[in-house]
Image (cartoon, rainbow, N blue to C red):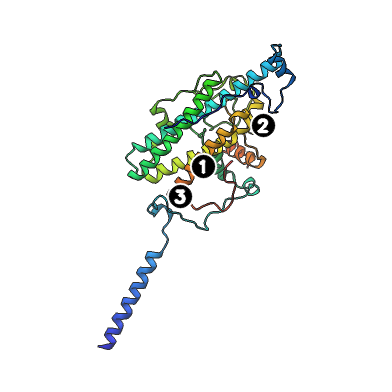
Amino acid sequence: MKTQFGVLLCFALGATAVAGTLLATKFPVSEQTLPEIGSIAVTQSMILPTTAQIASVPTSQGKALYERKCGACHSVDKNRIGPRHRGVYGRRAGAVPGFRYSNALKKLNQKWDTRTLDSWLSNPSAVAPGTSMGFRLTKPSERKVIINYLKSISGKLQK
Amino acid sequence: MSVLEISKPSRRALLGGASRTLSAAGVAMLIGGCSNAAVSSSAANTGQDVEILNAAIALEHEGIAAYQIAATSGLLQPAVVDIGVTFQGHHKEHRDALIKAVQQLGGDPATEKSQNHYVDALGVVSLKNQEDVLRLALKLERGAANAYLGLIPSLGNDYHQIAAQMAGDEAFHAAILANAIGEPIPKSALMFG
């Protein structure tokens, strides 16, 4: 009798431990219910790369930087505040069908390549005075990463 | 709801100079003299400001539409809808302040596009649940904070503060949305701009 009780007790304790472990297990983000707005979750899981690290990251990861810096106005495949960017590398300036360009861009007689994109992103109004794009990407390393990304969505990336 | 006040462009700004003293061309203008270069420069600067401010208005039109689409999507919990409507109100204040600035400069403010345009441009059909909506909103707000900070050097001095203030509002929105999604707080500072 005591032996049977002991076995049952051990089983119950073991089951409890397993259940507790399962409840304490972190689920992948996609399976988590959203926390109530106002609560704060701080983890060690995400550390933003430094600028130097960004400059050396693979082009595919340039998408994240593109979305942070350019995504307010641009998309890859849709005209928004700015024209869509798929195929931009190698394209003539002011040439996306269906987008209403400023007069400054319509008159800008150049193709987008590494040099012209770098100048443009550094100071658009110096390249095309009167442009509606006022945003300047001042860090050379970030311009490099984004230009590489623009190349990748234009089928122009060299291996 | 109060409208953000923007002071009228100062004479210093209209003359295109950042210094506290008037240039020789500026003095000539004041006493009725003729300085084609100064007039041309100030007109060009004003025109540039109008173009950039109109792009910002277009950004705000899109943000307002995005929150409207989100609020009526049926995908959001009521408390989240309330926050979205509050953020939309902030964007309407931004829009109104920017429109006033463009009008003061003698320009025509950018007009909003159709709802269908924004639905297509923002890829709304791909949104399936509340988290999708929040992630889209976060992407737009983060982008907007960076956009306002990034365009400050291109704007006339009179608009630097309002652009920085708007960047602050967008960063606040982004922080709330990131928290709602469960994103960790970034370890590094200088996370915008």
What's the amino acid at mark 3?
A: Asn
Q: Which label lies toward us, 2 or 1?
A: 1
* Residue identified by numbered label 3: B179
For residue B150, above or below residue B107 = below
In the rendered image, residue A17, in percent from the top left (x then y), is placed at 37, 72
Q: Is residue B162 above or below residue A7?
A: above
Disc 3: CA contacts within 10 A as few (<14), some (14-19) or many (>=20): many
Graded by Cα atoms within 10 Å as few (under 14), some (14 to 19) or many (20 or more), the crowding at tag 1 reads many
Residue A100 pos. (x, y %): 51, 22
- When asked about the image quadrant of residue A7, the answer is bottom left
| Residue, disc 1 | B171
Mark 1 to mark 3 CA distance (whole Å): 12 Å
Q: Quadrant of the C terminus of chain A?
A: top right
Amino acid type assigned to the residue bearing label 1 in the image: Ala
Secondary structure found at label 2: helix
Chain ID of residue with mark 3: B
Residue at 68% x, 15% y is: B30
Q: Viewer-proximal residue, B102 or A45?
A: B102
